[in-house]
């Protein structure tokens, strides 16, 4: 008999069906026992007569197979239940290292992460990644519908895309290589190769010493790059449409998980506010008496400027533009004397996106590389395509764990990472 998922049971009322899943809860009465079974689609109540099946040795989280009749019912889980005819234990569970069959997972984060595969069985933890999956799917859908091509770029590279020291070094046969900080070079190369519009969803690696609630050393970056743009504002317009589409899709397809997590989605309104970085620094100085900023915002500054955006514009997002050249990588298009055609997108006090227009002129790019104290010869495999016709282009990168964490009001970005890697954690 073919297995039926729990959320499909309404299609089989008064019919014999087979379900398989994990034993979530047991409640034994004098003559009958109620079993709650969980599969990937939900929970269902099953009713067994005690004189038919021996249930004395049953253990929670064992994997079981049940054949029975689907019936209309009025219970706390569903308007249906299963009257059990046959019961089989497929895999008996040992004693669980953590208790997961409660409404709240009342454990510290290290314990949860040390038992990650078990903790994900909890409906709240599971719901985080169901929503995250919807976000990635909607990212892909939005871009594919706008003529973008998905690409898959190397994660073992000869040089870091950011030109800094925050890279993981590894032995690569007789050479030294690095784990990729970003697919940036490859995105630009593929724009120049003729794809014009490309995107990637993949892991990136940052050897930062940070060990905070907002940093990971391996995370998932949702990147895009597009050619034939006018300026960085075209990229910002695209991201605003993208964010609205992602939120709309999560609202439509993830309502069940949002309810489990008790989360209300943010409202953007007509548009996301945009201010220059220098203006943001002045606002922080005049409105919040924060005077210790120079060319960038610290975490407190990010929180305060988002508070300002919420109070003034009613929006949880804000674009900051025109970062100084000293704070941006070598490929960033300069603007005026010391600025750049770049931006960050902040969401509820945390930067989730960096983007902007890129340099598309070969000679300007070589000059910029030198200005960062780098040797252009080390980047020839990247810069050569700029000799042969490169359109005006730009792009952005969204940190998946960060946007998930902010969207769902999680306290630590590690909660939004399936198997996190940070300063101290390399298992499981």
Image (cartoon, helix red, strand yellow):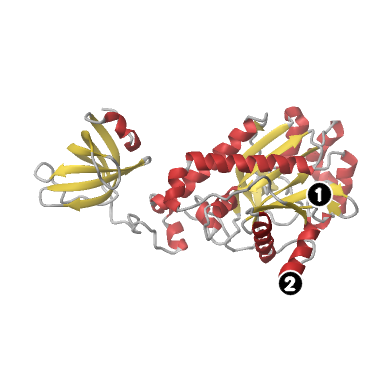
Of residues 197 and 251, the one nearer the viewer is: 251
Q: Which quadrant holds residue 38?
A: top left
- From the top left corner, tell me how far across and down residue 1 is, in percent: 26, 27
Q: Residues within 10 Å of mark 1 (few under 14, many from 20)?
A: many
- From the top left corner, tell me how far across and down residue 188 is, in percent: 75, 38
- From the top left corner, tell me how far across and down residue 361 is, in percent: 87, 39
Q: Residue at x 55, y 50 (%)?
A: 404
Q: Which quadrant holds residue 385?
A: top right
Q: Is residue 300 above or below residue 38?
A: below
CA gap between label 2 and label 1 equals 33 Å
Secondary element under disc 2, as helix, strand or loop, is loop
Of residues 147 and 95, the one nearer the viewer is: 147
Picture disc at residue 330: 1
Q: Along the horizontal axis of the image, is 366 left or right of 56?
A: right
Looking at the rendered image, the disc whose residue lies closer to the viewer, 2 or 1, is 2
Q: Along the horizontal axis of the image, is 104 left or right of 372?
A: left
Residue identifier under label 2: 289
Looking at the image, tell me whether mark 2 or mark 1 is earlier in sequence order.
2
Picture disc at residue 189: none
- From the top left corner, tell me how far across and down residue 258 is, in percent: 46, 48
Q: Which residue is at the far left?
A: 51
Of residues 312 and 155, the one nearer the viewer is: 312
Q: Residue at x 50, y 45 (%)?
A: 131
């Amino acid at each position: 008999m073919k297995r039926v998922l729990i959320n499909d049971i309404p299609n089989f009322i008064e019919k014999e069906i087979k379900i398989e899943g994990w034993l979530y809860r047991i409640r034994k009465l004098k003559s009958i026992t109620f079993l709650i079974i969980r599969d990937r689609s939900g929970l269902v109540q099953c009713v067994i007569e005690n004189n038919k099946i021996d249930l004395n040795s049953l253990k929670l989280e064992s994997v079981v197979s049940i054949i029975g009749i689907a019936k209309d019912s009025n219970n706390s889980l569903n308007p249906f239940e299963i009257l059990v005819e046959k019961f089989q234990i497929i895999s008996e569970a040992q004693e669980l290292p953590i208790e997961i069959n409660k409404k709240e997972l009342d454990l510290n984060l290290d314990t949860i992460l040390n038992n990650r595969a078990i903790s994900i069985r909890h409906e709240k933890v599971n719901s985080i990644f169901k929503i995250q999956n919807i976000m990635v799917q909607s990212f892909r859908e939005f871009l594919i519908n706008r003529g973008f091509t998905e690409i898959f770029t190397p994660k073992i590279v000869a040089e870091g895309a950011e030109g800094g020291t925050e890279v993981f070094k590894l032995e690569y046969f007789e050479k030294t290589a690095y784990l990729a900080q970003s697919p940036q070079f490859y995105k630009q190369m593929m724009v120049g190769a003729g794809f014009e519009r490309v995107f990637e969803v993949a892991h990136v690696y940052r050897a930062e010493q940070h060990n905070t609630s907002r940093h990971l050393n391996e995370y998932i970056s949702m990147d895009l790059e597009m050619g034939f743009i006018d300026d960085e504002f075209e990229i910002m317009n695209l991201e605003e449409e993208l964010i609205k589409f992602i939120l709309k899709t999560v609202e439509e397809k993830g309502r069940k998980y949002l309810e489990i997590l008790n989360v209300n989605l943010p409202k953007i309104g007509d548009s996301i506010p945009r201010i220059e970085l220098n203006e943001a620094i002045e606002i922080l100085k005049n409105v919040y008496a924060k005077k210790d900023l120079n060319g960038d915002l610290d975490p407190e500054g990010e929180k305060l400027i988002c508070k300002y955006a919420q109070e003034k514009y009613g929006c949880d997002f804000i674009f900051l533009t025109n970062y100084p050249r000293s704070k941006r990588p070598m490929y960033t298009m300069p603007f005026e004397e010391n600025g750049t055609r770049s931006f960050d997108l902040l969401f509820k006090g945390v930067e989730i996106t960096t983007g902007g227009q890129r340099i598309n002129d070969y000679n300007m790019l070589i000059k910029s590389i030198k200005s960062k104290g780098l040797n252009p010869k080390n980047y020839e495999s990247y810069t050569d395509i700029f000799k042969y016709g490169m359109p005006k282009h730009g792009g952005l990168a969204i940190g998946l764990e960060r946007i998930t964490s902010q969207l769902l009001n999680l306290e630590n970005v590690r909660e939004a990472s399936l198997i996190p890697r940070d300063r101290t954690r390399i298992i499981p």
